[in-house]
């Protein structure tokens, strides 16, 4: 693709102040965080590929998630902006003493830092916090406890990591399975109560479950709702799918995709392909054979150097949808969610093909040898309930730009997600849950994708 140099737009989401909702015994116990979308010029394909190579390894974390919200740690409170990550399980923060944060440009200033010496309620737990990223960066330091405040709630003696040595300017709040905590994977210790577990233990919510909805590509807000479901934010009824095990263990949010179609064109049936629901991935990544079929139907032009495909921006106005099937549920994704505007580096203006046609990034890319991922280009169209207690995902079509809220509490025990029905005879994954050096891999064969020279 010598005639086209593209630096893609990625979407970042920043949280406004957490909102406490209905905490009396007669009304739902939930904690809600509204999410505000912000845009930056980045290359999401390069960023996503670094993340996905280690997405399912217990000792790896997601450095570049897309949700920011405010919490405070310590006494007096120190305000910190954290990335919300469904793919990891620890909360960790930077400190002003780290080499990275004390550099001339002070890259950690915008998201905040934590100083143990400035808190009267700080307590050291152990000096074995060590989190690694697939690109060689990471953070190491201490595990500690302190007062955590978020969403109008306070949690005392909450365990978290302090990155005295760090190469990532943003801290992370992981809300995944506790088996992915650093002290489990690195130190061989038993898991501690991370945020979803502590919320249940402290009576803030009844179940380790939360809902996530992003709204459409152009919207400015989305939400994460701990312990509840907002029935106004989706269409139809929630349908419940089992999470697939990896190596016999529940550790990642993998569900089984069974089919895909574009308009009236059936692209694939009887897939039984495990796909990772990853809110930290800008694009979606599917097996190469499936991706090639999509590109052929769409007329997308694939660039091997970029690892992604491009289509005319006018495709965003197409009435076609790409429909993802999961045994019973089908999520329809509009072309407007998959055709992503891009700009040149340093804001040099819109990019185009060599014939002058405006070019846009297409929101599905080949997974290669990595795991299949449904990222934001899919998740924006799906209302998702992550039920860690029952190892299930409930899913429905998003109701874009809903104007009301109807929040219902998620109870404890089986079938606790309100307005959700189990998918009968849901297919187990036949591909995509194999472990290779700790990673999930797809067994669908690798093929050569079409390339193009402009």
Image (cartoon, helix red, strand yellow):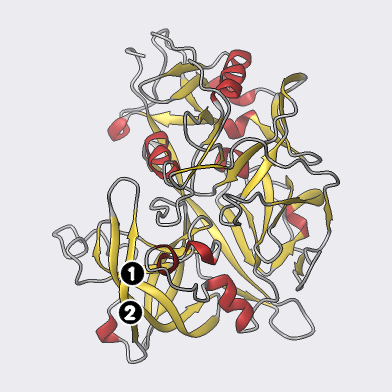
- Where, by quadrant of the figure, is residue 116 drawn? bottom left
Give the image location of residue 55, x and y in percent. 46, 47
Rendered residue at 77%/80% (across/down): 27
Rendered position, 120 above or below 442:
below
Looking at the image, can residue 53 be seen?
Answer: yes
Secondary structure of residue under mark 1: strand
Marking on residue 126: 2
The quadrant in which the N terminus is found is top left
User: Within 10 Å of the Cα at label 1, are there few (<14), some (14-19), or many (20+) other Cα atoms?
Assistant: many
Q: Residue furthest left?
A: 104
Tell whether 360 sits left or right of 74.
right
Q: Nearer the viewer, residue 55 or 9?
A: 55
How many marks can you see? 2
Residue 218 location, quadrant: top right
The CA span between labels 1 and 2 is: 8 Å
Quarter of the figure with residue 130: bottom left
The C terminus sits in image quarter: top left
* Position in image of residue 292 (x %, y %): 56, 18
Looking at the image, which residue is at 40% across and 79% down?
Answer: 73
In the image: residue 454, left or right of residue 231: left
Residue bearing mark 1? 129
Q: Secondary structure at mark 2?
A: strand
Tags 1 and 2 in contact by the CB under 8 Å rule?
A: yes
User: In this rendering, does residue 216 appear at all?
Assistant: no
- Which residue is more in the foreground, 85 or 445? 445
Q: How dense is the environment of label 2, judged by Cα within 10 Å: few (below 14), some, or many (20 and up)?
A: few
Residue depicted at x 69% and y 82%: 23
Q: List x then y, in percent, for residue 206.
A: 70, 76
């Amino acid at each position: 693709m010598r005639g086209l140099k593209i630096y893609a737009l990625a979407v970042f989401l920043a949280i406004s102040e957490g909102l406490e909702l209905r905490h009396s015994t007669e009304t739902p116990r939930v904690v809600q965080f509204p999410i505000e979308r912000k845009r930056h010029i980045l290359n999401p394909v390069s960023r996503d590929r670094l993340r996905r190579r280690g997405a399912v390894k217990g000792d790896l974390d997601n450095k570049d998630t897309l949700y920011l919200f405010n919490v405070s740690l310590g006494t007096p409170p120190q305000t910190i902006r954290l990335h919300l990550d469904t793919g990891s399980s620890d909360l960790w923060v930077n400190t002003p003493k780290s080499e990275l944060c004390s550099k001339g440009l002070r890259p950690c200033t915008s998201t905040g830092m934590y100083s143990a010496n400035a808190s009267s309620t700080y307590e050291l737990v152990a000096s074995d916090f060590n989190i690694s990223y697939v690109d060689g960066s990471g953070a190491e330091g201490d595990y500690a406890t302190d007062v955590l405040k978020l969403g109008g709630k306070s949690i005392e003696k909450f365990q978290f990591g302090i990155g005295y040595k760090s190469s990532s300017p943003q801290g992370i709040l992981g809300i995944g399975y506790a088996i992915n905590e650093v002290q489990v994977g690195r130190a061989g210790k038993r898991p501690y109560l991370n945020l979803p577990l502590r919320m249940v233990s402290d009576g803030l919510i009844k179940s380790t479950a939360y809902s996530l909805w992003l709204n459409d590509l152009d919207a400015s807000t989305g939400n994460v709702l701990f312990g509840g479901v907002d029935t106004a934010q989706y269409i139809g009824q929630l349908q419940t799918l089992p999470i697939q095990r990896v190596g016999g263990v529940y550790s990642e949010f993998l569900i089984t995709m069974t089919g895909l179609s574009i308009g009236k064109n059936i692209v694939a049936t009887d897939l039984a392909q495990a796909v990772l629901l990853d809110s930290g991935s800008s694009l979606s990544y599917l097996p190469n054979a499936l991706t090639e079929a999509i590109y052929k139907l769409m007329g997308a032009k694939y660039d091997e150097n970029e690892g992604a495909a491009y289509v005319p921006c006018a495709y965003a106005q197409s009435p076609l949808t790409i429909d993802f099937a999961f045994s019973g549920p089908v999520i329809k994704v509009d072309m407007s969610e998959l055709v992503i505007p891009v700009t040149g580096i340093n804001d040099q203006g819109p990019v185009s093909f060599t014939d002058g046609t405006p070019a846009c990034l297409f929101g599905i890319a080949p997974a290669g040898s990595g795991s299949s991922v449904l990222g934001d280009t899919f998740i924006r169209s799906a209302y998702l309930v992550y039920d860690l207690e029952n190892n299930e995902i409930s899913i429905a079509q998003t109701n874009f730009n809903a104007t009301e809220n109807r929040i219902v509490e998620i109870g404890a025990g089986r079938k606790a997600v309100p307005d959700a029905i189990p998918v009968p005879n849901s297919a187990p994954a036949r591909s995509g849950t194999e472990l290779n050096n700790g990673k999930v891999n797809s067994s669908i064969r690798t093929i050569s994708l079409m390339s193009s020279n402009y």
